[in-house]
Every structure is written in structure tokens, then in C-alpha cells.
Image (spheres, helix red, strand yellow):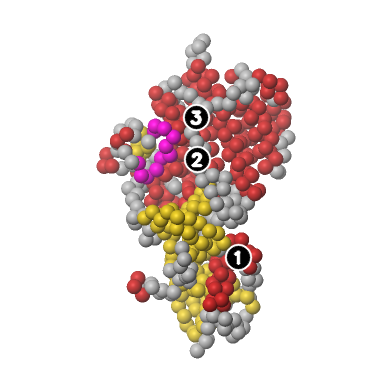
Amino acid sequence: MLTFDLPCIDPSISRTVDTQPKAVAAWLERLPFASPMVSAQQLVTALCALNRSPLDETVRYTLMQLYRPVVARVCGEMETLLAGFGVPPRAQQRQFGALLRELQIEHSIGYKHLLLAQIQQRSGSVNARLLAEIAAQLMGALRDIQTACQLTRTLTTPGLWQEMHALYAYAQTARLADSATNNAPALSLAYRQAVLMALADPSRMRHAEIIFTRHLLGRFGGLAQLCDAPIDGGRGFAIPSMGDTTPCHYVQSPGSASVWLDTEVLCFQLREIVNDLRHGASLQRVGLTLDMEIEFSRDTCIRLFKQWRGGAVRTYKRYPTPGRTVQTVAGVGSIHRLLEQTAQANQPEFPDSSFRSFEVAERTSDATLDASTAHWISDNDSAVGLALNGTPDAPLGLQVGDALAVRVGGVADWSLGVIRWGRMRDASQVELGVERLAPRMEPAWVRPMRGGKLAEPALFVPGLAALRQNDRLLLPHHLYQPGMDAEVHHGDHCYLLTFGRRFKHTPNFDLIDFTIFADLSE
């Protein structure tokens, strides 16, 4: 028997909630949509009362039909407000995130009531079409809770995957999983979208990448197929469909799975999209209507292809490092200021680049630097990165793709890294994954020769002869253009150089090589 964890029904609450469809429809139209947070709070209050009131199932169904498009609209606007969400978040972002998750949860509870009422009715024949629609709407609502957790960098709501696995199993038994109606796509599609989003490893994705992936799954997610037996050739993914287990690449015992996901056709479609975009096709031509950059869309499709084609393995072994302390400073400007302070402290006579003939952008203040510094505990380490956890006492707002200066234990030198994933373990504990980029970096100032009036802070990254790696520059993202000439001050040197190939790219920085064509310090 399908069961859900539902709030207790309180008859006294029914006096506080309006259940007249016309009155509810008029109230929903009057919501202050210009203020998504106020609208969301009012919807949460109304749905909370509705979900705890004894209602006739026909009335509840009619009301949910009215609420559903409004909830979708308000949640979409709330998601836009979370575009800059980082960990740990600022107080207002934390409030936005909690409200978005609460709204999606209350929305799902209404469909849980409806589905159980349909299953448990004792008189008359069951309306199979209505049952399929309600079950599909519920699966979509549960999937949307998952997305809200991913966008707010929080752990998946406890019990969410247990309910999704159980709902899909019930729909399969009742032969409803692939039944589509005018009001809802098939339940199995929402389940596949949720599984694929989990396999995409959203903790490593930025906000825009999550939104893009959801849009792509809405268009092509149906190409992935669910099977009840292992796929020939070991392709696809074993889905642990028992318990509250999130699908992932590393299933401990695939033989215990009862559901498998075949992604071959979906990956073929992604490969075609990437090829078309490389040859100048527009997003509309490849079936995507989001207003996003071609390069971003192509790179995200490449990443998704790698995640969904299966066979992912860990390249480097991880080594536990319990209790080891790590200090970090985030952001190119803050790292630059840190390195200049360190150099001046170590060398009291450190020159202040008196030969500079140009103005520089405003430096990061000491207060800002202090606010961006954090202390962590290292969980594990590998050749390419490390995992950190901590409870910062300031809203650092760290995001995937931020440059990071890292100092491990008592080591004096700072190394360069980038945040590759981040999530909130609870309301205060943060977990980060950091990729190592270089063992050393030095402060530099960069002024583009075309239209650049102010020099901006950047990082000079010395090359490694053992790896045949040349010197590189880490620039704020807005500075980089291939082939651009720039004036660079680094220590006692002043160069004229040309920007070259890009090695690493995030919304916050570009790591590039360069070619020097004049040394002005000689």
C-alpha cells in the first residue's frame, strides 16, 4: 500500500481557509506578483491551512487546479532571486531559499491527499485517467522540491526519494507510469527528469547550469528510458529504488536495483546538439528556447554528456585527513590583496611598484579581506583537490567557480584553487570541494591596451617545468578577450603581452597563457 507522511487534519482550521473556487480564483489574481516573496508567503499560509483541513476530494482537486499555475509562476520568480545564491548564504537569500522549499513541499502535500483519496475510495470504479493525472502531478511536485533543494545548495529533503521511488513503483504496478493526460505529462517522465538531474551532480553546477539542465530535460528528458532489467553491455545506470537513496554514479550493489536507466539515445541527442552549436546553429534550431549564450550552452551540454553516458570512475584516490585545518580566501581581488600584504610583511622594503604609470582599480579593503577569509577542516585529500567542511560565522556567499587561495595546516605558502562544488549540510555547516590549480601565485596588475583606463588586480601563476607548463595569468572574467594586448605589472617587472589560450573558465575568472612582446622593465 502506498503511504505518505502527511500532516494531521484539524477540523478547526477549515474555518480559516476559503474553499470557494470563485473566491479563491479572485484572491489568486490579486496576489502581489511584483513582490515574489510576499506572494510566496501568502501561498504557503493558504496551502498550509488547506492541507490540514478536511475537504471533499472534488473540492480539493478543483482548488489544486487553481493553485498549481500560480505556484509555478511564483516559484519561477523566486528562483530568479536565487541566481546569486552562495554558501553560506546571506540572511535574505537564506529566507528566500527556505520559503521556496516550503512552498514546493506544501504544494506536493495537496496532491498526496488527492492520490490517497483516489486509491482508498471504496465505492464505485476508480477513474483511471484522473488517478494517472494526480499521480503525475504529484511526481512533478516532488521533482520540483528536489530542484528547490539543488538551487539552494541544501541536502535533499529527508524521505523525498523514498516517496518518489515508491510512487513510481506503484504507478508501474497500476500501469499508470506512462499515461499522459491533457493536464500532466506522464509520471515516468517526471521521475526520469528527477533521476537525470541527480545524476548530473548539481552540487557542481552553477545556478544557470541547473536552470539550463531543467530546460533541456523538459525538451529531451523523454529520450532516456527506464527498464526493469540490466541493459546489455553494461550501459546505463542502476537506480536503487528501495529506501531514501538518491541515484548516483557509484551504486554499491547494482544487482539489488530493480530499475535501470538507459541514456544512450539522450546522449546521442546531446552529441548532435553540441556539434550543431559548434557549427553555428542557434539554440532555437537545436530545440532549446532559453536566452543563454551559445558557448555556455555548448559547454553545459558537453558536461551533461559526460555525466549521463555512464562509466564514471574516480581518477585519483582520496585520502582521509581528519582534523587537518585549512584556511581560505575567496575572490581574485581578495587573493590579490592578501598576497600583497604577505609580500610586504615578509619584505619590509618591498617596493610599491613606483614605476607604475597608470591608475589602478580600487583595492579590496582590509575589512573585505577579513570577511572573505574562512577556516575549515579537511575531510579528505587527493592529487587534484580536497574536500572541506566548516561553520563560517559570516555569510561568505561562496559559489561554484570562485577562485580560492588555500593554506593547509601550518604551511606558510598559499596555493591556488577553485570551488568545484558546495552545499549546506544543515543551517550552518558548509561542505566544499576544491580543485587545485597551482601550488603558487603572485599578485599582478593588468591593464588592457584597448579602452582600458584602470589596471585591475590579477594573479600571476608561475609555470611548472616538470609538467611542461608555462607561466599563466588568472584574470577577472570580464577582462579576457583572445588576442587582446595588455600591460602587466608583476613584482619588479612590467610587460606588454598578448592574451592567449584559455585553460580554465568560470563566470568569475579565466586562467590563460600569454605571449610577451615587450619587457618595459629592462
Q: Tell me the kind of residue under disc 1.
A: Leu
The residue tagged 3 is 136
Q: Secondary structure at mark 2?
A: loop
Quarter of the rendering containing residue 28 = top right
The residue tagged 1 is 369
> Does 246 appear in magenta?
yes
Q: Are marks 2 and 3 in contact (CB under 8 Å)?
A: no
Q: Main secondary structure of the magenta part?
A: loop
The span shown in magenta is 241-251
Q: Tell me the kind of residue under disc 2.
A: Thr
Position of 280 with respect to 363 (left or right) is left
In front of the other: label 2 or label 3? 2
> Does 345 appear in magenta?
no
Residue, x 65% and y 71% (percent of image)?
Answer: 362
Image quarter hosting the N terminus: top left
Residue, x 36% and y 34% (percent of image)?
Answer: 259
| Cα gap from disc 2 to disc 3, whole angstroms | 20 Å
Residue 156: which numbered mark, if any? 2
Q: Is residue 476 visible?
A: no
Horizontal and vertical percent for residue 124? 51, 11
Instruction: State whether residue 279 is above or below residue 451.
Output: above
Q: Earlier in the sequence, mark 3 or mark 1?
A: 3
Q: Tell me the kind of residue under disc 3.
A: Ala
Q: Earlier in the sequence, mark 1 or mark 2?
A: 2
Q: Secondary structure at mark 1?
A: helix
Position of 24 with respect to 5 (left or right) is right
